[in-house]
Image: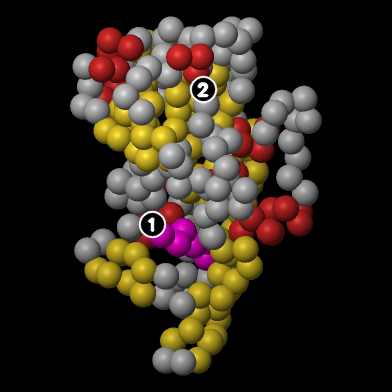
Amino acid sequence: MNFNSGSTPQTRTYTGTSLWSLLSDAGIQTDATRKNDVLSRYLLATGADGYKVVFTLGELNPDFGNKPAIVAYAETTGGSSGPLAAADGPFRVTAPGDIKGGRYVSQLVRLRVQPSAATAAGTGGGVSASFAVSGAVTTPLSFDLKALQAMVPVTQTVGANVYTGVSLWTLLNSLGLRLPAGKNPSLSMYAVATGSDGYRAAVSLGEIDPGFGNKGALIAYDMNGAGLGANGVARLVVPGEVKQGRSVSNLVAIEVFAADTP
C-alpha cells in the first residue's frame, strides 16, 4: 500500500482481514423496508488515542464502492512478516488507494456500525426542482439549476455517460463545514443525499476529500449535454462504483454530520 504520511511517501505491506468481511460476519443490521438501506449507514473506526475516521458502508461494500480496506494485524518488513509495531498495532485499519494516510487508524480499539442521522424526508417522488444542504455547515442553503450553473463545472464519465455538475467536496466547503474537535476532523464526518422518493445514500467526507480518498463525487445537473429530465434538477453521481446505488436521482436534500460517539 502506498500513501503519504505528512510529506513522506510510505510503502507498506500488510496482512489482515477484509474490513467488509469482518462486518458482514458480525451481521450488519439494516431496515428491510428501505431500498439499499446499507448505503445510508456508516462505520466509525476509533483508535486508542480517540482518533476517529468514518467509512460509509457503501464505500466498503464490494457491490458498490468496493474499497479493499483491511484490519491489519501484521506487516512484512525485509521479507519477514511480524506483528505491527507498537505505534500502529496490534490492529490497524487501512485505506488502500488514499493519497494521505489519515484514514489509516492505528491502535484500533473500536469499530461501530451506525445508521445515519439523516432526517430529510422524500416528497413522495417526482421530479425535483431544487435541493437543500443542511446539518454541520455554517450556511445552510438551497440550490436550484441556476445556482449550480453559477459554480465551477466539473465532469465525470460513468459508463457511457458524461455528467457535468459541481464537485460535492467544493459545494460543501463553499458553505463552510462545522468541524468537530480533534485531528483531521473532517475524516469523522459524512454526508447523506436524499431523493424525492426518500431513497438515501451516504458518502464520507474523507472519501471525497482530494487530500485523502479523492473520489470525485459530484452533484450533476447535465448528462451528455442535456438536462437530467425525469432524474430531476440534480443527481449525486459517485464515479468508480461497481453498481451505481449511491447515485441519488431527484435530489432534495444533502445533510452533513459529524459521526456519533459512544
Q: Position of residue 243 (x, y in %)?
A: 57, 42
Q: What label does residue 98 carry, if any?
A: 1
What's the CA distance linking mark 1 and mark 2? 27 Å
Task: State the image quarter where residue 28 is shown.
Answer: top right
Query: Which residue is labeled 2 in the image?
Result: 249
- In the image, what residue occupies the spot 28% across and 12% down? 147
Disc 1 or 2, which lies upstream in sequence?
A: 1
The quadrant of the image that shows the C terminus is top right
Residue 94 lies within the magenta run = yes
What amino acid is found at the position of numbered circle 2 in the picture? Ser
- Name which residue lies at 45% across and 24% down: 235
Secondary structure, mark 1, is: loop
Q: Quadrant of residue 224?
A: top left
x%, y% of residue 22? 69, 59
Q: Do the residues labelled 1 and 2 touch (CB within 8 Å)?
A: no
| Relative horizontal placement of residue 156, taking residue 42 as reference (left or right) | left
Answer whether residue 70 is visible to the viewer in this image: yes
* Residue 183 visible somewhere in the drawing: no
Q: What stretch is highlighted in magenta?
A: 92-97
